[in-house]
Image: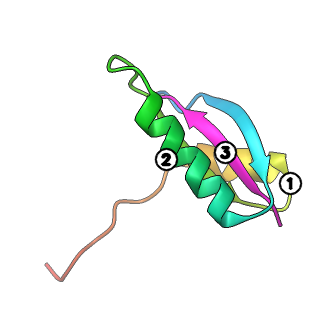
Amino acid sequence: MPYFVYRVSPKLELGYIETKDKYQEARALVRALREAREADDDGDYRLIFAQQQGEAEKLLSTPRDERVIGED
């Protein structure tokens, strides 16, 4: 399965960038994009592992639950 690279805005607007077959290539691309972004750019670059682009967009646009660390 391929790795999809997206730019995700704070309003969860997705911007498709590229698809990579290998994790190392996708990770290197995301790191390079994060380092090269402008100071006033409030979006983030993410990679997602999915079978197709539609599935990747669905996974990225679904809000994630807050992680609970430890017990209350």
**Would you say 19 lies left or right of 11 here?**
right
Answer with mark 3 or mark 1, whichever residue precedes in sequence: 3
Determine the image quadrant of residue 61. Answer: top right
Identify the residue at horizontal 71%, vertical 34% (top origin).
Answer: 17
Q: Hey, which residue is sitting farthest left in the picture?
A: 72
Q: Name the residue tied to disc 1.
A: 52
Answer with mark 2 or mark 3, whichever residue precedes in sequence: 3
Q: Toward the viewer: 55 or 48?
A: 48
Q: Name the residue tied to disc 2.
A: 31
Camera-near label (2 vs 1) is: 2
**What kind of residue is marked 2?**
Arg
Q: What is the magenta segment's predominant secondary structure? A: strand
Q: Which residues are magenta?
A: 1-10
Q: Toward the viewer: 12 or 24?
A: 24
Camera-near label (2 vs 3) is: 2
Quadrant of the image containing the C terminus = bottom left
**What kind of residue is marked 3?**
Val
Identify the residue at horizontal 58%, vertical 56% (top origin).
Answer: 27
Q: Name the residue tied to disc 3.
A: 5
Secondary element at image label 3: strand
